[in-house]
Image (tube, rainbow, N blue to C red):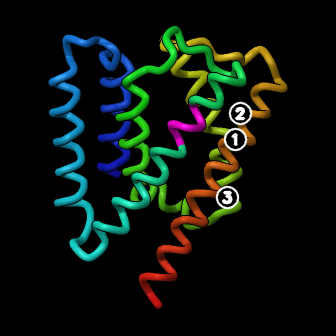
Amino acid sequence: MINGIIFQCLWFYFAYFGNDSNYVPIHGAILTAFLCFHFLFQIPKHDRWQEFQLMLFSSVLGIFMDLLCHYLKIITLKEFFYFWLIPIWILFAGTLNHSLSFFTNRPKLCAFMFSIFGPMSYYGASQFGLFNYQSQSVKLMIVHGVLWGVYSICITQFKERYHEKKNS
């Protein structure tokens, strides 16, 4: 639960201050503090490498998905890429084995829920004026939902493979 609350608080912080270059040292300090807290207090020592790999994989995949959404004009970034998306994806990756583990341990439910709530989170962010979201286009909303579903399948498959390797 703490993990989810931390994610939401930092999501708002990075969404609001993320592209302000005056805050870059603070951004780095906050992200570093989160990662230290996450790996030192939330992850058992023997699971840290596995957690790091999951976070790296899911963050890179999420950033790629945002760039693809920008290319497909699902989201329209005012600049080519927003710096604040990187820490948000890292923070989100930190929830996959914790506050979102109920879903990520159930691949079909995860795909269903991510397909719905992933696009809804973008719609919410667009209401803050963070970027333009093409929510008036049902076709693009469906494509975005499918992308989130594929993202969730990749994450759950990655988790399953590493869990099997660890327990073999």
- Could you tell me which secondary element the residue under label 1 belongs to? helix
Q: In this view, does 20 lie above or below 90?
A: above
Amino acid beneath label 2: His
Q: Residue 137 carries which label?
A: none
Distance of mark 3 from mark 2, alpha carbons? 17 Å
Contact (Cβ within 8 Å) of mark 3 with mark 1: no
**Boundaries of the magenta span:** 62-66
Distance of mark 1 from mark 2, alpha carbons? 5 Å
How far across and down, in percent of the image, does residue 46 sit? 26, 76
* Mark before the other along the chain sequence, 3 or 1: 3
Q: In this view, does 134 lie above or below 91?
A: above
Instruction: Please name which of the two marks, 3 or 1, marks the residue nearer to the observer.
Output: 1
Amino acid beneath label 1: Leu
Q: Which residue is drawn at 61% across and 14% down?
A: 76
Q: Residue 109 carries which label?
A: 3
Q: Mark 2 points at which residue?
A: 144
Q: Report whether 104 appears left or right of 92.
A: right
